[in-house]
Amino acid sequence: MKDSLRHHCSSAILLFFSLAILSLLDLGCGKPNSLAPEDPSIPGRRDYVWKVDTLYMPVNPGESIWGSAAGDVWVCGTGGPAGQGMQHFDGRTWKALDVLVNGFSIFGFSKDDVWMGSNDGQILHYDGREWTLNFDFEVDGTHFVDICDIWGSRPDDVYACGFILYKTSAYEPESIKGFVLHYDGNTWKEVCRGDFNSQFLSVRKSEGKIFVWSFTFQDYNNSDIYYQLTNNGKLEKLFSNSISKIIMGNNLIMNGKVYFSIGYNFFRYEDGLLVKVLSVDNINYGYCCYGRSERDIIIRMQDGLAHYNGTDIQYIYHSPSPTMIIIAVPVILEKDVFFLALDRGKTLVLHGKLND
């Protein structure tokens, strides 16, 4: 169990294997990974030209992808030997970098302001020249601390979340607690820790409100739960469902609004209500949506990618292999998209570019 939690915190994948449900769930979406079109009322285009790159990450796969531009894309993973856990794309080629951490989550604001969370409580920062340790979240009496997600609304308002696996005796149940950290431009501070067994998988902020997606497990009654974090560090449950009802998905920020993928539906959260944007009536739906606007949404499928333009849904990419799994939050730019995928141990990047 400990190894399972550590290896795929970003997707909580091994917690779902035994249930034979879609693996490698994704988390959220944030800027500048997602750029709004000039006019969100115009249906999004579908004329992508696709290229697939295979990254050299032989020991463990990529976990997270982020980019500020088509010539500045990062992929981090759970590592192996030096130089195999971090890759950077300059618009032409991918290059392995020697960063001696196991990266689980990556996010930034520009080419010289990038954050990465690791699987041992460390948060690193890239200033355009080098990666340096910025914060080490140390908790006594633990096996490890994982940073599952990192996201920010601006450089002085950055959040990170994850989970702490506490040490217990052989006769005690494992104790796992989710947490949320905040960076104000100077220092990192813990703002919330769950008092129940949980993994905090994603954190986003919209209109001053902080939203946390958690996988919670109590006495084998597993649930996906969305919370709102209050000013006093308390979690207020927004909605939840048991894993048996297959509530899976992500939360993303699009044009300043927060959206939730829940089951086969995609909602906008507004004034405390869930407003349905679309439903995906397809057995191959991958339970995650991303986009530039409500008329330009890319939908993860188990066999590729589909697109919703405000009217209908059509495939825009078909996976060439039945074992390919699209994972992680994609990079969505004005004319380019980058999706991270796995196929039989290989780490792939699907690069889609709109025709000029």
Image: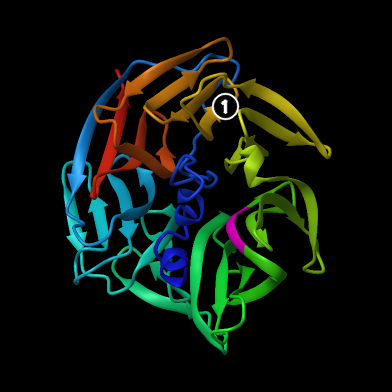
Image quadrant in which you'd find residue 280? top right
Between 294 and 202, the one lying in front of the other is 202
Q: Residue furthest front?
A: 171
Does residue 256 show up?
no
Between 331 and 108, the one lying in front of the other is 331
Magenta portion: prevailing SS class:
strand
Q: Position of residue 302 (x, y in %)?
A: 41, 31
Residue, disc 1: 293
Q: Residue furthest top?
A: 311
- The residue depicted at 70 percent of the width and 32 percent of the height is 268
Q: Is residue 349 magenta?
A: no
The answer to whether residue 264 is left or right of residue 273 is left
- The residue depicted at 57 percent of the width and 10 percent of the height is 311
Position of residue 242 relative to residue 49, above or below, is below
Image quadrant in which you'd find residue 246? top right
Q: Position of residue 135 (x, y in %)?
A: 49, 78
Q: Where is residue 301 in the image (x, y as percent from the top left)?
A: 44, 28
Q: Quadrant of the C terminus?
A: top left
Range shown magenta: 199-203
Q: Position of residue 58 (x, y in %)?
A: 18, 58
The answer to whether residue 52 is left or right of residue 328 is left
Position of residue 39 relative to residue 221, above or below, is above
- The residue depicted at 19 percent of the width and 67 percent of the height is 83
Q: How many marks?
A: 1
Q: Residues within 10 Å of mark 1 (few under 14, many from 20)?
A: many
Image quadrant in which you'd find residue 322? top left
